[in-house]
Amino acid sequence: MKKELLAYAEIMLENGVQTMKKRVKIFLLGICMALSVNVMSGTVFAKPSIFSETACVLDVQSGAILYEKNKNQKEYPASITKIMTTLVAIENSSMDEEVVYTDNAFANWESGASNAGIKVGERISMEESLYAAMLASANEACNGMAEHISGSIDGFVKKMNQKAKELGCQNTHFANTNGLWKKNHYTTAYDMALIGRAAIRNEDFKTIAGTKTYIMSKTNKNKRGPSEPLVNHHKMINPADYPQYEYEYCEGGKTGYTSKSRNTLVTFAKKGDMELVCAVMKCNNSVWLEPNAYTDTTKLFNYCFENYEKTKIQDNAASEINEQYLFTNFSPFYSKETSCLHIDENAGVILPKGVSIDQAEKKIKYYDKAIEENGKKVIGRLSYTYKGQEVGATNIYFDENDSPTLRDSIDMSKWFDEAVETASKPPFPWKKVSLLIILACCIIGVSILCFLKVREYQVKTENRHRFKRNRRNLLRKERDFYINRFK
């Protein structure tokens, strides 16, 4: 009976230790999972696999990169070059200017090069020339506009390269206006996305790129007018015989193809308040074979629209600019309603769904001197970065205010110095603190596990010793009993 009780007690003790150990493990696992959810709240979604060799998707408003594949790999652009040609032409001319097409507009063509049927000596408006370049991919239209604007095609190409540098393109060099193959005519998916981003923000370009068909007027060489309208070659906005490629959010774009560049495509799409530009390059399959540039573009747009969202920063930033960083001594004069400071109304931050704007790092920079931009006075820039990448930014504008309290009662140098000092303070290191907390929890967890292991070993040793003692005592008593009995 005593043996059975001792064995039962030992089993119960071991079960109790094991149960406590399991509970502690579950508790520690729960802590680690909670912390990992907090730290990993900005989960990066799995990137889609595409057929094109290079690609890049940018948010038009913020410039944030939402997807990239070999984005800085140099490739031949083919006719998506005409996006830059059209943008530079729009910025350096008016729509009603008349373009006279000389022999130079038809020089150095490849066999079968795209054209709009324009003839030597024909006079066409700048507006119609732009539609011919973007919709029909007319090579002669690009050269004719270039010669009209700069006096020579080479002079216009210099403007194109200068514009590329202004936009931040670091791996781009244009050698012609139309994209016909030349060894020193190259760009990248990222640079083309930058160029597309700048182009779609121009309202004239946006209208042209989004037009499905366009009928040109009569000219001095064509008294009856064209027999057929210009048709947009981009299948996502004008599918024609390929309805499977139509995309409801597509705003327009530009196609490109040469035997060496293969298929290239730049596309613009808008869903809700998110507007994106997608550039894919060097896609070997043509429109009748899948996967191709269209299926890749559709897949990338769907991925970005499903996994990212835009958060407007107007309400979040306005009060902070006026109260936290600027005018802390003069806030009564600068309420949200009457402030002479403001930012772009539609400015926003593009973040993965589930990530709040508070998780992005905010930075405000003030300029030593105000900058004139589009007739507005810019005094600084507000930007947001997430995981080392800028995901949104806006200018800080200053508007003159006629209130005498502003002109007579405020020493502007005081609030500016204070603003610079406050804005220069480093943000609270949340990432480091989170890592330290995780490290501390891991150390505590390991310590607890070690303690339990040691305690478990001690309990087992004590039980073993107790069992041996009890067994010796029991044997001694039995021996004494039989000895006394047979005396």
Image (spheres, grey):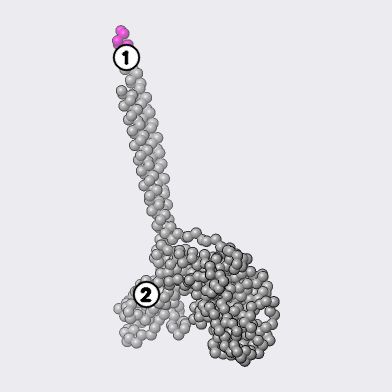
Checking the image for residue 318, the label placed there is: 2
Rendered location of residue 139, percent (x, y):
63, 80
Classed neighbour count for the residue bearing mark 2: other residues with Cα under 10 Å, few (<14), some (14–19), many (≥20): some
Q: How many numbered markers are drawn?
A: 2
Vertical position of residue 341 compared to residue 467: above or below: below
Judging depth in this view, the residue of 246 and 348 nearest the camera is 246
Q: Which residue is mark 1?
A: 480
- Identified at 63% across, 80% down, the residue is 115
Res. 395 image quadrant: bottom left
**Mark 1 touches mark 2? (CB < 8 Å):** no
Vertical position of residue 110 compared to residue 469: above or below: below
Judging depth in this view, the residue of 332 and 79 nearest the camera is 79
Classed neighbour count for the residue bearing mark 1: other residues with Cα under 10 Å, few (<14), some (14–19), many (≥20): few
* Quarter containing the C terminus: top left
Horizontal relation, residue 16 to residue 182: left or right: left
Rendered location of residue 110, percent (x, y):
69, 77
Q: Per the image, is 353 magenta?
A: no
Where disc 2 sits, the SS reads helix
Q: Per the image, is 483 magenta?
A: yes
Q: Main secondary structure of the magenta part?
A: helix
- Identified at 35% across, 40% down, the residue is 20
Magenta-tinted stretch: 480-487
Rendered location of residue 363, percent (x, y):
43, 70
Q: Amino acid at mark 1?
A: Asp
